Image (cartoon, coloured by chain):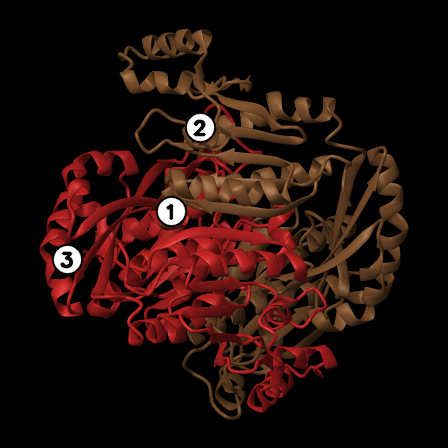
Chain colours: A brown, B red
Amino acid sequence: MGNGKGAAEVICVGTELLLGDILNGNARYLAQELAALGIPHYYQTVVGDNPNRIQRALAIACERSRLILFTGGLGPTPDDLTTEAIADFFDAPLIEWPNVVEDIRKKYASIGVAPTDSSFKQALQPQGAELLPNNSGTAPGMIWEARPGLVLMTFPGVPREMKGMWSETSVPWLKQRGWSQGTFASRTLKFHGIGESTLAEQVAPYFERENPTVAPYAGDGEVRLRVTARAETEAEAIALIDPVAKELEAVGGDHYFGADEQTLATVVGELLLGRGETLAVAESCTGGGLGQRLTDVPGSSSYFWGGVISYDNSVKQNLLGVEAEVLEKQGAVSEVVAEQMAQGVRAALKTSWGIGITGIAGPGGGSDEKPVGLVYIGIAGPDGSVKAVKCLFGQRERGVIRDRAALEALNLLRLALA
Amino acid sequence: MGNGKGAAEVICVGTELLLGDILNGNARYLAQELAALGIPHYYQTVVGDNPNRIQRALAIACERSRLILFTGGLGPTPDDLTTEAIADFFDAPLIEWPNVVEDIRKKYASIGVAPTDSSFKQALQPQGAELLPNNSGTAPGMIWEARPGLVLMTFPGVPREMKGMWSETSVPWLKQRGWSQGTFASRTLKFHGIGESTLAEQVAPYFERENPTVAPYAGDGEVRLRVTARAETEAEAIALIDPVAKELEAVGGDHYFGADEQTLATVVGELLLGRGETLAVAESCTGGGLGQRLTDVPGSSSYFWGGVISYDNSVKQNLLGVEAEVLEKQGAVSEVVAEQMAQGVRAALKTSWGIGITGIAGPGGGSDEKPVGLVYIGIAGPDGSVKAVKCLFGQRERGVIRDRAALEALNLLRLALA
């Protein structure tokens, strides 16, 4: 790691962050941007609109980082204290920038408002700092080598202004001065139906690699491996990723389903499109969640024709043709009902494939024989065959069981289509 | 400020945060919760999955905070290092909790998977720590007074698990030990169909109040006002909130729909239950999202019977009885089709009410006459009447338009039922 210059640190200033009024989207944006530039970044700090605490955070950052990115606290109100706190920390006088004074006058005039005295506070920067222009607001920031080898940048907290200033001025500045050496590229491999720890054990030796690096993470019922490489050019970085990704995909086998922006719904969509086939769904316990995932994909109307939310048993009978006798003898949550739902919706909507989901999402409705988390998923295919799979998602929350059931249905269809 | 115990600090552990892969929703949640408890909170730190840097962040936090909340790094993989790093920092041996070992075995068994050796790492906690149980995942956390007057708590990074553990165990623990002096109570009032700035202007004088305080925030297409009071007892705090909340509800008028855990889906459910009526939905552009919202509510099967996802026009005709001529002349996205869908699904499922949604979620499929964001919502009532409303959600993202359409449909039904 390292670019020869040192690591970056993000310090977000704003009491609204400490009260939880807003999500810290600025920290995420800068994190993504630093990763793309290959600038290492080990710490983020959030601190309130308080000059002493801003200075304490700055003192810590100076010890461990060489590029300190501040967001927030540059505006005209008494709460905006970042610039003064930084100047005071380094014992630097504040200097007024006449062109910024002029710019503030013009921007206020353009909206027909008289600037207050405090507006001109935004024209002050510590002596020695370069101006970091703000083309969409009144508060500029600064780029300042406050000590040899220690660079500070300040940005307003307004995301749009911060992003514009970062990409228009900061990124070129950093590239020109050698902060971004080479290029980083990464690929996220996605797996379904295998636990995080099981996959991690199978690919453990890869976690020791240096370039590309491999790291696991889990989220939303998916397990992911992120492969990241560094090289002179993007093409070279991708060439480093490709063979390792192939090996990891092979280890994952059937569990591997896609990379990066791909989801189970997009993969299923691509497979259906490739085969010129169509799909309909019959949902009981997921209540529309499978249809929603499928139709999250733009263009899904080419292969997804719709479905029936058969929450009540009367709907299972009347619209899907599930037999009353089966419902009575086997119960609504049973293998046969899942199969009849899949076949019924395929027939009613005249599609190639049909999926039927019936289960107990809880928290009520479970029994010893049929516990919460029991879900049957039926898949009816274009050859007229049908098969149901029994899933046990455990005593989880209602929302989790419903999500897992929808994902599992997509995965079963993916395996049937592949 | 101050509760006599000292300030809290949040340390989020996760390289995925430093790469910008995810937003730091955990920090925001804990910030909101600390504010509600009246526990001061001056710093948040984000650090990667690296034991040295976790320990450096911990060393700094010990100097300035008395309650340190860790999220992330409790799982079974080699990257999950938080517990070890903390134990090592305080020179405490790790102790295995037999009941957690047993619990891990059971949770794996309930999903039919064999636990790996590394799974049991999650049963280790530093000697002297109390267990912080995790009822929805395998990784518990700890509550540990590591030094006199210094309390550490650890939570997994999975938001659902962290939130459950926080509210079920940490909050009662903190209250019992006097971290939250006096009692804070708050109520979040929810509004639909009014902009944040419009509502904020109408209730501006309330933002100056001290006890209770009133603060606005927006999220997920809802506008909310949070009323927070501090008093000796909860009953006294609620007595302070009640009159102010009533005034704010009156200002909101029809736009006010509920408080706290209530959602448009629960409110609609309560209204339907109260009237002994039932509902069915016909969804085109939302693709199941309305059904999913309705069935997110436990017990919704008492009033929600199901629906038809009529993504393809053939489904609108065959299952809902939308007329071919209307589809051809008016187009699928039209007032008449929304009405016929609502009536059709009400008739097919034999329910009191029917909702029909048809629109253009984009990004493709828009025209000058029918732009992306145009949605018609039809409501058919028990008296046989039907009425469609035209909505323009603007050139927003596909997911946003779909969410707004589902919420608007629930709101229209709420107004029809009220």
Tell me which chain the residue with mark 1 is part of.
B
Q: Are marks 1 and 3 on the same chain?
A: yes
Q: Is residue B296 visible?
A: yes
Between label 2 and label 3, give the one nearer the viewer: 2
Q: Quadrant of residue A418?
A: bottom right
Query: In which quadrant will I find the N terminus of chain B?
Result: bottom left
Q: Is residue B418 left or right of residue A89?
A: left
* In this view, B44 is above or below B251: below
Local crowd at mark 3 within 10 Å, few (<14), some, or many (≥20)?
many
Amino acid type, label 2: Thr
Determine the CA span between mark 2 and mark 1. Answer: 31 Å
Q: Secondary structure at mark 2?
A: helix
Determine the CA span between mark 1 and mark 3. Answer: 22 Å
The residue at which mark 3 appears reads as: B241
Q: Residue at x 70, y 42 (%)?
A: A40
Is label 2 in contact with label 1 (beta carbons under 8 Å)? no
* In this view, B45 is above or below A121: below
Determine the CA span between mark 2 and mark 3. Answer: 39 Å
Amino acid type, label 1: Gly
Q: Are marks 2 and 1 on the same chain?
A: no
Q: Is residue A24 left or right of residue A339?
A: left
The residue at which mark 2 appears reads as: A83
Q: Secondary structure at mark 1?
A: strand
Q: Residue furthest front?
A: A91
Mark 3 or mark 1, which is nearer the start of the sequence?
1
Q: Residue at x 25, y 69 (%)?
A: B273
Camera-side residue of A391 and B139: B139
Q: Quadrant of residue A72?
A: top left
Q: Is residue B323 visible?
A: no
